Amino acid sequence: MKFSNKTYDAIKWIVVTVLPATSVFIAALGHIYGWGNTDAIVATLNAVAVFLGSTMHISSASYNKKEEDEG
């Protein structure tokens, strides 16, 4: 699948900034207020971030290889 630069940048921002920040925010508030299952929520967010980051890296490497082959 080929994304536009705008879409790729938005997904990258979510993966690199939003998901980790949300994870830390939930972990901190969960600890402060004694919320249950925050460890599971944080682990899930981190797993999603790593999965999306990995797939984006593979997609980017594939895209760059095609560009080199065509150029």
Image: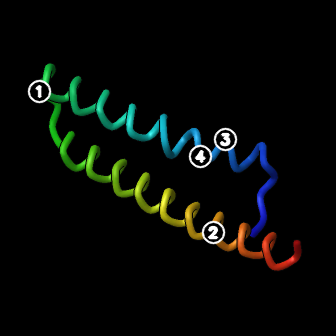
The residue identified by callout 3 is 10
Looking at the rendered image, the disc whose residue lies closer to the viewer, 3 or 2, is: 2
Distance CA(mark 2)–CA(mark 4)? 14 Å
Marks 4 and 3 sit apart, C-alpha to C-alpha, by: 5 Å
The C terminus, quarter of image: bottom right
Comes first in the chain, label 2 or label 1 = 1
Image marks 4 and 3: residues in contact by CB distance under 8 Å: yes
Callout 3, which amino acid? Ala
Task: Give above or below for 46 relative to 25.
Answer: below
What residue is shown with label 1?
Answer: 34
Foreground: disc 2 or disc 1: 2
Numbered tag placed on residue 12 in the rendering: 4
Name, please, the residue furthest toward the right: 71
Q: Which mark is residue 61?
A: 2
The x and y percentages for residue 34 are 11, 27
Badge 4 crowding class, 10 Å Cα cut-off, few under 14, some 14 to 19, many 20 or more, is: some
Pointer 4 or 1: first along the chain: 4
In the rendering, at what x and y percent does residue 48 appear? 42, 55
